[in-house]
Image (cartoon, rainbow, N blue to C red):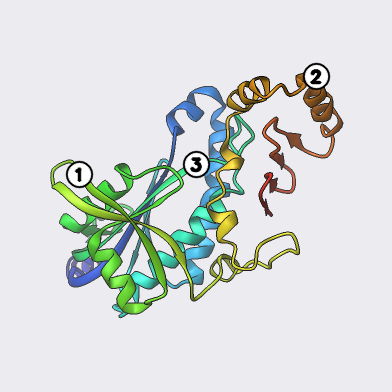
Amino acid sequence: MYLYGLMKNMKKEFADCTLLFTDIVTFTNICALCTPYDVVTLLNDLYLRFDRLVGLHDAYKVETIGDAYMIVGGVPEHCENHAERVLNISIGMLMESKLVLSPITHKPIKIRLGVHCGPVVAGVVGIKMPRYCLFGDTVNVANKMESNGIQCKIHVSETAKQNGLKANPSYVFIDRGNTEIRGKGMMYTYFLERNDRKSVWELCARPRSGEQTIDGYMELHDQAIYQEEGNQEKANAENGHNSSANAANNNNNHHSGRKMMNGTSVDPGSHHVRSPTCTIC
């Protein structure tokens, strides 16, 4: 009971913090088409990468529920650059997710990310396996930023953008425009494109190979690695490409990794992903 009394008094208001939610696109379909063991392996691979980034940038991991992953900056310890920390993590998360392969397609998974800033109340709830939880409309809006986002994009609210630029004017955002957010009406939102102060490799704390661009943002936004093979086959047929030659080429690459007809190859063993435009490893 003494411990319970202490935990009850741990609730605290935070005037401003930055929240991030992320989830896996088509996760339900993945679960339906593979074994539970494959799902656990997929999530563990992804979350170990995310956990490393959270520790690297000194943020706080709140919880995971299924494929949903939630973090916060500025809680439980206040800091002035909480938006910068979380936005940097979001860039790292998007890059790291490209190294996690779907057990169904053997191509990189796609994730959505949403970021929002605002006040919260935080505290420990429960006695059995007590958890440190966040409450307030800020949590709801951050979650809506993710659910109303676009795959492989970092969807950011006005407050997250302003707080990010206040801490680091080198962020580059592009306007998404007015977005219908359920329960909130129209909100003007943005997509985070890059941090001109740091490369993707610095944000991920990974060495750059000779094949990769200096700042890594071409690799970050490369969509070729997600391209469906069926769409590429259709394009090849329209362009008069020899499908039998492509098939032969695929067979030649069978032992060195899975070769897609769109020119993308992946090696599940080494998590080496190569597209016609860039290499991620």
Label placed on residue 110: 3
Left or right position of 91 against 18: right
Within 10 Å of disc 2 (Cα), the crowding (few <14, some 14-19, many 20+) is few
Q: Report helix, strand or loop for mark 3.
A: loop
Within 10 Å of disc 1 (Cα), the crowding (few <14, some 14-19, many 20+) is some
Q: CA distance from mark 3 to mark 1?
A: 22 Å
Which residue appears at 53% of the width and 35% of the height?
39
Q: Nearer the viewer, mark 1 or mark 2?
A: 2
State which quadrant residue 109 falls in.
Answer: top right
Q: Report helix, strand or loop for mark 2.
A: helix
Which residue appears at 58% of the width and 25% of the height?
231
| Earlier sequence position, callout 3 versus callout 2 | 3
The percent position of residue 63, horizontal first and vertical second, equals 37, 53
State which quadrant residue 41 falls in.
Answer: top right
On the image, numbered disc 1 is attached to which residue? 181
In which quadrant will I find the C terminus? bottom right
- Residue 41, can we see it? no
| Earlier sequence position, callout 1 versus callout 2 | 1
- Name the kind of residue labelled 2 in the image: Ser
On the image, numbered disc 2 is attached to which residue? 244
Left or right position of 254 against 21: right
In this view, 90 is above or below 181? below
The percent position of residue 241, horizontal first and vertical second, equals 73, 24
- Name the kind of residue labelled 1 in the image: Ile
